[in-house]
Amino acid sequence: MPPVADILYAEPGRHTLLVPSQGSVHARHEIEVVARVGGVIESVSDGFVAGGFFQKSDSLLQIEPADYRHQLTRSQSQVANAAAALAQEEGRAKQAKREWRDLGSEAANNLFLRKPQLAAAKAELAAAKADRDQAKLNLERTAVKAPFAGRVVETLVDIGQYVTAGTKLARIHSVGIAEVRLPLTDHQLSLLELPLGRAIENGPAVRLSANLAGQPREWRGQIVRTEAAIDPNSRFVYAVAQVPNPYQGDAPLINGLFVEAHIAGKTYDDITLLPRQALHEGDHVLVLNEENQLGFKDVQLLQAAGDQVWLRGDINAGDKVVISSLGYSREGMVLSPNPLNEKPSGIYLGEQSEKPSDEPQSESAETASGSSASAQGAY
């Protein structure tokens, strides 16, 4: 009696591969807030604490403005004085023009017409206005405002502390978009539609998952770009996924959270999902013909995950793929098949070109969708 071998009827189908990766969440923007002017911190906002939220243009803290108001007042006075001096000089220039007689020298004529004095008065007014504008700007800078809607990561100062221009005040990050750097091997890149030499338009979808507060959570995002260089140590290419509005909904996508990612890859029309033990030496499977004689078929391993493999090659619907571990195998040897699933729809015993008879089919020829369901379950 021939040895018994467990077999699965192959059912190639259309599948979109999911490429796994993982990474940590970080905000699209994370910056250090720095004082633009010096002074004593007069007040801080309620949101100026680690973890506090704020909106764009909200005031995070206030530096004492009194000195800068005085400076603005003095600069406004200087503008008024410079404007008056210019008006007087313009009057003198008009009077000189009425009295002017050609002195035979351009320099002498210009001096008589007070052109150098007029130019100096105009320059004084321009400088006074610049000082006024700078004083106004410095006064505005005493209110430290948020450049975007975000969250405080860390505060570095508090009320009553004296700071100088350039002092680090806090570290903040945006909350509009979260990003995840996802490492990809060269093989994984081959399964994705990712251009490396140009910008990505309408990149592949990404499903992110993690346990948060003891509950499994999921978020949806999209690959928006790849980084400019291959990592010299790991030889990975990093793709960047973005998730818009990460703090909306019941489960916020918090900075620093480690997530698993599955990226939608290429779609193939002829992929067969089989148990890992069906693949031999990484490039072929064992099949039984209609006489249950053993044969070999070359395949390409596209992806392996857990105990399943996604194969592409010369596998036809209804092929009897051996999944048992055979102690000895040679081409042409006869085995007794033990089917673990049912034949796919439209596949009949005997020649495939023959049509089914009116007699009831045997149990082994009945159609089922179990194999397809198991393949879809893996996604």
Image: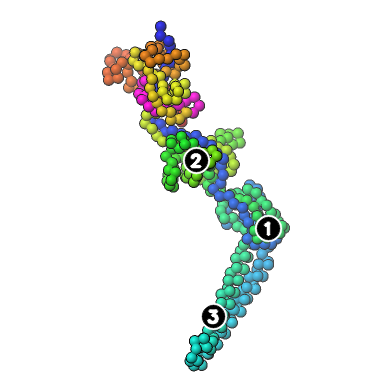
Queried whether the magenta region covers residue 344, the answer comes back as no
Q: For the residue marked with disc 3, what is the amino acid?
A: Ala
Q: Where residue 175 sits in the image (x, y, percent)? A: 56, 48
Hey, which quadrant is residue 216 in on the image? top right
Q: Where residue 26 sits in the image (x, y, percent)? A: 56, 44
Q: For the residue marked with disc 2, what is the amino acid?
A: Val
Mark 2 / mark 1, whichever is N-terminal: 1
Q: For the residue marked with disc 1, what is the amino acid?
A: Ser
Q: Disc 3 marks which residue?
A: 119
Q: Where residue 233 sits in the image (x, y, percent)? A: 55, 39
In the foreground, 265 or 57: 265
Above or below, comparing residue 266 to residue 150 in the picture: above
Mark 2 / mark 3, whichever is N-terminal: 3
What distance separates the C-alpha of mark 2 from that of mark 3? 61 Å
Above or below, comparing residue 116 to residue 137 in the picture: below
Judge left or right: residue 88 versus residue 365: right
In the foreground, 285 or 4: 285
Residue 262 visible in the picture: no
Q: Disc 1 marks which residue?
A: 43
Q: Nearer the viewer, mark 1 or mark 3?
A: 3
Residue that appears at 53% across and 41% down: 232
The dot on residue 237 is 2
In the foreground, 304 or 228: 228
Tell me the magenta residue range.
305-320
SS at badge 1 = strand
Q: Nearer the viewer, mark 2 or mark 3?
A: 2
SS at badge 3 = helix
Image quadrant occupied by the N terminus = top left
What distance separates the C-alpha of mark 2 from that of mark 1? 46 Å
Residue that appears at 53% across and 84% down: 115
